[in-house]
Amino acid sequence: MRKIFDAQQIRNWDAYTIAQEPIASIDLMERASIAFTDRLLSLFSDKDFTIFCGKGNNGGDGLAIARMLVAMNRKVEVYVVDYSAQASPDFVVNYDRLTSLTTIHSIKTLKDFPVIGQNCVVVDAILGSGTNRPVEGILKDVIQEINQSKLPVISVDIASGLYVSQPIARGNTIIQPDYTLTFEAPKLAFLMPQNQLYVGEWECLPIGLSREYVQNTSTSFFWTDMVSLKKRAKFSHKGTFGHALLAVGSYGSIGAAVLSAKACLRSGVGLLTTYIPACGYEIMQSSVPEAMCQTDPAEKELSVCPDLEKYTVIGIGCGLGKSEKTKAFLNVLLRQVKSPLVLDADALNIMAEEADMLALIPAKSVLTPHPKELQRLIGTWENDFEKLEKVKVFSQKYNCIVLVKGMHTAVVLPNQEVHFNSTGNPGMATGGSGDVLTGIITALIAQGYSSEEAAIIGVFKHGEAGDIASQERGQMAMLPSDIIDKLRW
């Protein structure tokens, strides 16, 4: 897990490293430029390079990268966008170092913009993480020309014009890179769906920034790139790992019940009981023989709440439907349940329509809405940052964990922490993948993981399995059942 910092914290991280290592700021810039250059050449080993630099430290990185490429006898053209009379001290040092090796061109007006060769990769080192207002003038003109070039573009640390941790205004002019190579940790902006065009594929490059600073600096945002699992005791038995209930399915949607049950069993639950409409009995018994099966008196829906005493955790919602009888069933269950719930799909839709039910959510329950279900719960939003803030308010108000599902699913905790996930791919964007996730998280809570841990770990392992499946099947051919088959614990 990595911490995600805002723009000021990033500046402070650099300054702390410089003071405590100690290292001169120009040498820290050199370290970052070496890391960038090495990765650049591994991505584009047979290309020429045109590097556009601003006059701040991001531009200083660009000049250092150019110097390293020139030293390797690579074909490099360097252009400095002359938008200000001021330049950072480290920019000046790297400018002086480069002038004896190659020509540095200046862009003062749009007529100075070069014709770029078709074998070129454009390196964007114009503006860095300190950007906090829309670009104007020659900066805007140059960025627009780069975007219109249709050549591969790779940004140094962050795309020029993109804000690190605040929404962009409509009409902002921002570099649209194919790649962003950032330093040490992802920027919050990279994880917002609305910014996809301004990030491209991204990677974090380690450059030796202070670990002590990370440990001592607080943040609400985290990047989950690994998880820790509990070791199973040698003399464990099925009772050790909990008894889960999945209240799922309706006529025509028993498949959702089967997927959630299989995923739950594949994720280590000790005992699993499925509670389903009578119409699903034979399907469940034949499809998932490892699960116990209890049926509702109703043929096509869940209508009567069963005895809940013996269950460690209850997952509810997959394929549930929204009949009046099912709404009444859910209302009764919410009033009787004493264990945490994993709430998905129509359970959430019913609660969004019957707002009084929200107050009945047991503490530390996990809600797993897809985007439309989330909107029904929290209302509309103007941008992804506002969406996250509204989810944080909801999570704190109802003392529950909420997943904002999608690429880089965000797990929002009642303490206001947000954990972004690093696994998963677009091949998982198909009906049934959410049912699998519900089963996984339910199993983890049954085994004694906290709801927070279960949500973070479950999302990570769900995405990891999806990545394995995509490598074997390809994203278009993936099925949710493939995710279950590729779960590894």
Image: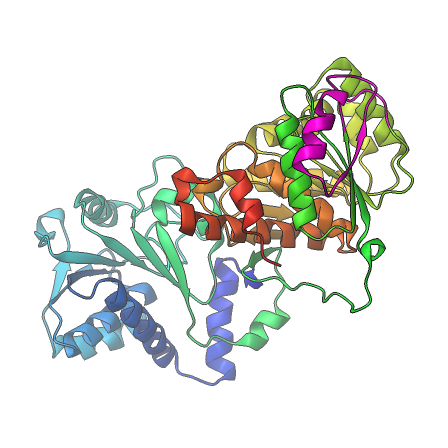
- Which quadrant of the rendered structure holds the N terminus? bottom right
Q: Which residues are magenta?
A: 276-305
Residue 254 image offset from top left, x and y in percent: 65, 27
User: Is residue 415 visible from the viewing direction of this image?
Assistant: no
Query: Is residue 299 part of the magenta span, yes or no?
Result: yes
Q: Quadrant of residue 96?
A: bottom left
Please name the colour scheme applied to the rendered image.
rainbow
Image vertical order of residue 337 relative to residue 469, above or below: above
Residue 335 image offset from top left, x and y in percent: 88, 30
Q: Quadrant of residue 389?
A: top right
Front-most of residues 370 and 63: 370
User: Is residue 469 visible from the viewing direction of this image?
Assistant: yes
Front-most of residues 235 and 320: 235
Front-most of residues 80 and 223: 223
**Furthest residue in direction top, as rendered:** 324
Residue 458 image offset from top left, x and y in percent: 64, 50
Could you tell me which residue is drawn at 67 percent across and 51 percent down? 267
Image vertical order of residue 39 relative to residue 311, above or below: below
